[in-house]
Amino acid sequence: MSNKMLEIKNLHAEINGKEILKGIDLTVNEGEVHAIMGPNGSGKSTLAAVITGKPGYEVTKGEILFYGKNLLEMPPEERALAGIFLSFQYPVEIPGVTMMNFLKAAVNAKRKYEGKEEMSAAEFLRFIREKQKLVEMDTNLTNRAVNEGFSGGEKKKNEIFQMAVLEPKLAILDETDSGLDIDALRVVANGVNKLRSPERSFIVITHYQRLLDYIVPDIVHILYKGKIVKTAGKELALELEEKGYGWIKEQF
Amino acid sequence: MAKKDDDILKKVTGSEYEFGFVSNIEEEIFPPGLNEDIIRKISEKKNEPKWMLDFRLKAYRKWKSMEMPQWAHLRIPEIDYQAISYFAAPKKPKYNSLDEVDPEILETFNKLGIPLEEQLVLAGVAVDAIVDSTSVKTTFKETLSNLGIIFCSISEAIQDHPDLVKKYLASVVPVGDNYFAALNSAVFSDGSFVYIPKGVRCPMELSSYFRINAANTGQFERTLIIADEGSYVSYLEGCTAPQRDENQLHAAVVEIIVHKDAEVKYSTVQNWYPGDKDGKGGIFNFVTKRGICEGENSKLTWAQVETGSAITWKYPSTILKGDNSISEFYSVAVTNNHQQADTGTKMIHIGKNTKSHIVSKGISAGYSENSYRGLVKVMKGAENARNYSQCDSLLMGDKCGAHTFPYIEVENKTAVVEHEATTSKVSEDQIFYCNQRGISTEDAVGLIVNGYAKEVIKQLPMEFAVEAQKLLQITLEGSVG
């Protein structure tokens, strides 16, 4: 019924000659929330990196389509402009560049891509304030340099804030819950939930069930040794929580 | 796009060009070589008084006895001073239309948003039909002269204001100060002269750009700025557009005198031709810039963005002689490809309670070498002198170099001198982070570099600052990823 957004077919990828992804198949439809779980080193972050086009990864086989377009032929910024957003596991610091200027560059790049005019300064400010309120973002953070001196929690909140500003079609959350205390986790999850819509999809990468108590997924995948070994409904996450990854390791 | 510009150009110039304005201009170029006869001829051509000729000859004799300095962290190819022609009449147009100009330069002009008229001047295209700027200039001149401000070429000043020139020329940079200053004193072609009378606040930024048409001043430029008691002036040197010049050696001298309670702000954007990507060609820029805070409570600020030249050797300096005088130095020096820069500042504290503040930001990319060399000297009598120096280096890629050579000499116990230095790198992760937010690599580099250089850029006058930001981005294009 719903439209296909992302299609990953038999994806193989390596870094420094070492194969990490060994044949991934994944389809994400509009409005769906997928959780990808799995033990350390199973390839979760690599999958996020390959989808977003991070340099250093080589795709050796397979394809990724985004609304039918070949994503692997697009440079990273074009993938972003097409509507793919990554909430970084380790957000990068950019000294001297204020969040305001950074966001302005990002928003204007997006508007240009969409054939719209740049926002006026007043318009932009209003837009930013609105989004800040939506994700309960501290207004002071936007006047500081990008992620510089931010606490772990602030960095992650800042990622969600940027997601709210850029209004992506597909958001990939790469271990957004790691290093968060329970209050920050709630803020982050609330932000994500407010952004859920029938047109917007999410891929939530996490080790733990905890985040999925707040962001309830439609589908849960288990990634192990570079392959998706199990796919089921949200109950799979609970099962994992209960049993750990041991049984997966035994089985595969 | 050159086609479109060419059409406009044709419309403006029409057929008049055939009659040529070139013929009105003396096209004399002296034979290469430097000797006393040549200097006499330069002086004669410029119709200079005897004292000026004597000044030149003295400088020449001094220069002959000197040797080129070797201490800078630079690889300077041998320069044959006898192969250079030391006098050329006003530049004749090199091209008949923009179509003949290197498209890469035009591309840069467009990125900088430089109006067509300026593009023509800068690229050296015949611009006889462009007269608008002349009227603009006249309006400026009137406003200034009503306030008693003198702003003219140094050649004119020698004719019209000999007392001022005699009094101040070489008072800050003595004839024999260094090899290149001596050479400049002997053969300087032209330059700017500024005098701001007592208590006058110059109502506009004085820009050397307004004189760009005037003459072939580029190679051995001489600038003299005098701010009398309680006056203020902001002076802009250069422009952000790339400047081409066949003359490989540039040796300018700038002298600034700041009297009691006066303030001078001197901003530079230097964008001389840096040579090609393989390091061929390019300008050697050996400049001596120095100011003196002569009176109490005087202030001199240097703000500069250096992106051009194959080799840069430049240390704008301040002598803090008046008590409570202040000097600030803000610099961004960018080197890319095979460029080399050895730049910095000297702050000489003589007066009591003198303060200096140095912010130097080096950016190296490609195979370039970028050195900061600074001297902070506190003399015996400089009670309570204060200096704060901050030297940051930003590296792009792993083939370039950044070096810091701070010299500190303190002869007074009450002085407080602080020095901080940092080195950082533009990382692939930063670029990818920007890319992931939809920002192109080009814009990302611009964003990161301008963030890094912000402290300096904001010291520049508004319009200059906007252009300088774009310039930084363009200079570093393609240096990451």
Image (tube, rainbow, N blue to C red):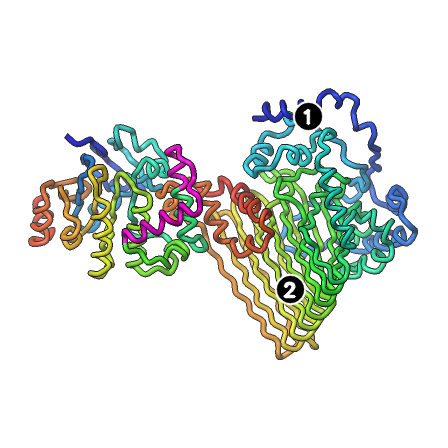
Instruction: Identify the secondary structure beneath mark 1.
Output: helix
Look at the picture and state if A94 lies above or below B470.
Answer: below
Find disc 2 in the rendering and name its residue: B327
Q: In the rendered view, does B47 fall on the left or right side of B234?
A: right
Look at the picture and state if B256 lies above or below B323.
Answer: above
A29 and B137: which one is in front? B137
Residues packed near mark 2 inside 10 Å, few (<14), some (14 to 19) or many (20 plus): many
Quadrant of the drawing holding the C terminus of chain B: top left
Residues packed near mark 1 inside 10 Å, few (<14), some (14 to 19) or many (20 plus): some
A223 and B78: which one is in front? A223
The residue type indicated by label 2 comes to: Ser
Residue A83 in percent (x, y) is at: 30, 38
Instruction: Identify the secondary structure beneath mark 2.
Output: strand
Residue B329 in percent (x, y) is at: 61, 60
State which region is magenta: A108-135
Q: Residue at 69% of width from left, 35% of height from top? A: B121
Q: Residue at 75% of width from left, 23% of height from top? A: B17
Q: Residue at 25% of width from left, 48% of height from top? A: A174
Residue B183 in percent (x, y) is at: 79, 51
Specify whether residue B63 is in view. Answer: yes
Q: In the rendered view, does B393 fall on the left or right side of B86?
A: left
Residue B12: mark in rendering: 1
Q: Chain of mark 1?
A: B
Check if residue A55 falls in the magenta segment. Answer: no
Which residue occupies the extreme bottom position in the image?
B413
